[in-house]
Each structure stands twice: as C-alpha cells, then as structure tokens.
Image (spheres, helix red, strand yellow):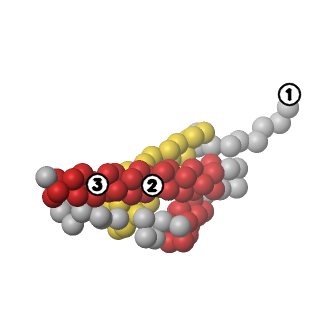
Amino acid sequence: MTPLLVLLVVGTVQFGVWLHATHTAQAIAAQALQSTRVSQGSVAAGREQAGALLNAAGRRVILHWSVDVVRDVERAHVAIRGRAQQVLPFLSVPVSVSVSGPVERLTTAG
C-alpha cells in the first residue's frame, strides 16, 4: 500500500509542476504576442521577448522549449512548446500553448 501512496503523491506533484509550466508558458506567450501585434512590432521582437522570458523565468520549469511566432497583415500568433520538469523519471509531460490576436493598425478618423 505504501508504494501506491508514494506514487499517488509524486503523481500529484508532477501534475502541479505541469500545471505551473503551462501557466508560465501561457503568460510568456501572451507577453510575446503583445510584442508581435503592436503597430511597430515584429516576429523577431516576439521571438526575442519569448526567448528572454523563457530563459529567465521558465528555464527550470519548461525544458527543451521552442517558440513559433507568425504575423501577417491582420493576425499575430505565438506558440510555445516544450516539456515540463520531470518528477517521475518515466513520465515526460509535454507543454503546449498557443495564443493569437489581431495586429494593431493605426487609422485616421474620417
């Protein structure tokens, strides 16, 4: 019974680590989207923002990450993929978030 209880507790901790990694990736993707979608923004700015934040805040939470940033005339999109830190050695949990929004356009009144 004890090994099952230990596995249950460690599994719960692994779920918490995955949840934290997903929330971290979501917040970083939202920041990168803001850098991409503003009128003076770019794909490079979004990718740089995401990379800097992942290296600073998510380095120990999200492993083997990749960032995909796309911007066209109307929409911007940021996707972050990686792996959550492992608590259980046999369980590698993927983290994948995606956000998108309209590109900011300045127009004249009239």
Q: Amino acid at mark 2?
A: His
- Quarter of the figure that contains the C terminus: top right
Q: Residue at coordinates 68% horizontally, 43% vertically from top-left?
A: 104
How far apart are the two marked residues, 3 and 2, measured between alpha carbons? 17 Å
The residue labelled by disc 2 is 20
Direction from residue 51 to residue 1 in the image, left or right: left
- Which secondary structure lies at badge 1? loop
Name the amino acid type tagged 3.
Val
Seen at 50% across and 72% down, the residue is: 55
Q: Secondary structure at mark 2?
A: helix
Mark 2 or 1: in front is 2
Mark 3 or 2: in front is: 3
Image point (21%, 53%), residue name: 5
Residue occupied by mark 1: 110
Residue identified by numbered label 3 = 9
Q: Hey, which quadrant is residue 3 in on the image?
A: bottom left
